[in-house]
Image: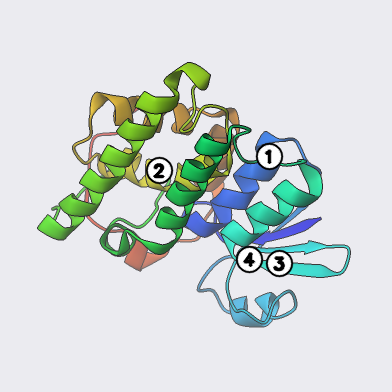
């Protein structure tokens, strides 16, 4: 398999399938194409007509979009282990993933993923509403599935990969969160493969100015 991704510091969509592949220790070749650089579109066109990362190539098949890639990996290589085994947990994990995929527009626009950054920003009422929704969702699922495992719906799943960029955003901009959501955010950030992603992001040289929002804040371990 080949996974084509953008910058590790900024590309939230790229993180999701990368984390799934890494967590389940599947072999793949990583091809990184820095976003918004000269030649980005030309280089990416060699791998996809969609014009966006991530893209997965596997034995002649091209799969694009982070959730579609995760679903393909789950079906083709994980025998369904990418979702919870329990039917109820699986349905809720899928629902939460779909909501993440289609919602939280204010957070996406005004809290861009920036793994190198610790930032202070002003949260608009619309942003607070979205933050509260994520917080409520995390609290509900962790409360329901706490006894089944330490991740969002028990065992580690695609849902955790889908929310990993959200955890990264919350870690960078530190909005108000419940203790339960703080714990879950920290668990995702401390995931060994997330730490590897962060380390590699710190080594990147590219800077995307529109993603460097807010004021520098005190660094947090």
Query: First in sequence: mark 3 or mark 2?
Result: 3
* Label 2 SS: helix
Between 120 and 15, the residue placed more toward the observer is 15
Q: Residue 33 — which label?
A: 4
Q: Look at the picture and state if 33 lies above or below 170.
A: below
52 displayed left or right of 76: left
Q: CA distance from mark 3 to mark 1?
A: 18 Å
Q: Nearer the viewer, mark 4 or mark 2?
A: 2
Q: Say whether marks 4 and 2 touch (CB < 8 Å).
A: no
Q: Residue 22 — which label?
A: 1
Residue holding disc 3: 63
Q: Residue at x 29, y 55 (%)?
A: 111
Q: Residue at x 39, y 26 (%)?
A: 144
Q: CA distance from mark 4 to mark 1?
A: 19 Å
Seen as rendered, the residue at the extreme front is 87
Q: Nearer the viewer, mark 4 or mark 1?
A: 1
Q: Is residue 149 visible?
A: no
């Amino acid at each position: 398999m080949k996974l084509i991704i953008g910058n590790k510091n900024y590309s939230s969509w790229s993180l999701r399938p990368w984390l799934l592949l890494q967590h389940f220790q599947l072999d793949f070749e990583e091809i990184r194409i820095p976003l918004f650089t000269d030649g980005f579109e030309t280089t990416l066109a060699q791998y996809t007509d969609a014009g966006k990362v991530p893209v997965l190539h596997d034995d002649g098949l091209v799969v694009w979009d982070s959730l579609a890639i995760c679903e393909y990996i789950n079906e083709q290589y994980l025998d369904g282990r990418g979702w919870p085994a329990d039917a109820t947990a699986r349905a809720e994990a899928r629902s939460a993933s779909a909501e993440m995929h289609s919602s939280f527009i204010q957070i996406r626009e005004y809290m861009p993923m920036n793994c190198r950054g610790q930032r202070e920003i002003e949260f608009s009422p619309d942003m607070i509403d979205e933050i509260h929704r994520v917080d409520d969702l995390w609290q509900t699922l962790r409360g329901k599935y706490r006894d089944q495992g330490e991740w969002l719906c028990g065992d580690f799943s695609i849902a955790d990969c889908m929310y990993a960029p959200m955890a990264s955003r919350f870690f960078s901009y530190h909005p108000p969160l419940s203790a339960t959501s703080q714990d879950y955010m920290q668990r995702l950030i401390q995931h060994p493969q997330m730490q590897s992603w962060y380390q590699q992001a710190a080594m990147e040289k590219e800077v995307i100015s529109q993603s460097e929002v807010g004021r520098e804040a005190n660094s947090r371990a």
